[in-house]
Image: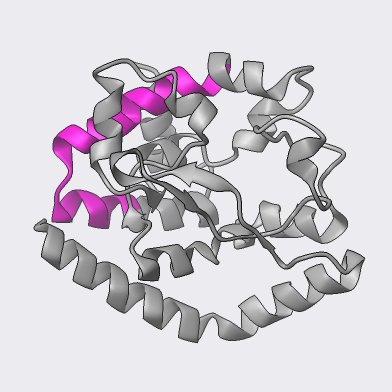
Amino acid sequence: MSLFLKRVFDIVCAAAGLVFLSPLLLWAAWRIKREDGGPVFYRGVRVGLHGKPFRIFKFRTMVVDAEKLGASSTSDDDPRITRIGKLLRKYKLDELPQLINVLKGDMSFVGPRPEVKKFTDLYNEEEKTILTVRPGITDWASIWNSDEAAVLAGADDADDAYLKLIRPTKVRLQLKYVRERSFWTDLKIIFLTFQALLRPQSAAVRDLRIVGKV
């Protein structure tokens, strides 16, 4: 897919998504604000295209200043997660505000999930090519591991568990996307993402988990 066509696709779909989902977005914002009076959005810094940092939009699912109280990675049993945060995370609703990042051009619908700088600093020369692609809301790695927090549950050090259990395969699948990206690849990833959300144990998702372990 040409960069121009991909950008047009992103703008049209992000704008339509924000309008269509506005009732759900307003409800989530109201519930977050009602719980503890803190900010509605989490605006953590992520590393984007060509290593340029940007602030991601996510619904806040943790206590205020959670980053100062623990690891960058989050497990399902993290005590920093709020009550409404558990619900938003369960159905991936906390990710919806990233449509704003797509509209702004920080992100795309499909592309390697953006990381914090402490993890991109670990990239070797080959892995740095991941930063030549605009980061996205979903990619092969997101489908392979659609519930990262569950994998990290029970870990004494969530960041260390992330580096050992998730990052190696995640990086391999992100490199796969960089090498093979196309319009049809993006459409397939979007389709499989919805399938993973609606039917986590579907055959397609299980097959992708196997691919991810090769």
Magenta residues, start to end: 165-189
| Residue 14 coordinates in the image, percent (x, y) | 38, 73
**Residue found 79% across the figure and 17% down from its top:** 156
In the displayed structure, 22 sits above or below 178; it is: below
Q: Main secondary structure of the magenta part?
A: helix
Q: Which quadrant holds residue 165?
A: top right
Quadrant where the N terminus sits is bottom left
Q: Nearer the viewer, residue 94 or 185?
A: 94
As drawn, is 149 to the left or to the right of 80?
left
According to the image, what is the colour scheme of the structure? one colour
* Image quadrant where one finds the C terminus: top left
Residue 24 at what x, y percent from top left? 64, 79
Query: Looking at the image, which residue is at 17% across and 44% down?
Result: 181
Q: Position of residue 162 (x, y in %)?
A: 59, 22
Location of residue 173 by image quarter: top left
Q: Is residue 188 magenta?
A: yes
Q: Looking at the image, is 213 positioned above or below residue 69?
A: above
Examine the rendering and report whether any part of residue 202 can be seen: no
Depth check: give the residue in front, 207 or 33. Answer: 33
Picture coordinates of residue 83 (x, y %)?
86, 56
Closest to the observer: 113 or 101? 101
* Position of 22 relative to 95 (above/below): below
Query: Is residue 109 in view?
Result: yes
Query: Does the magenta portion include 178?
Result: yes
Toward the left, the furthest residue is 2
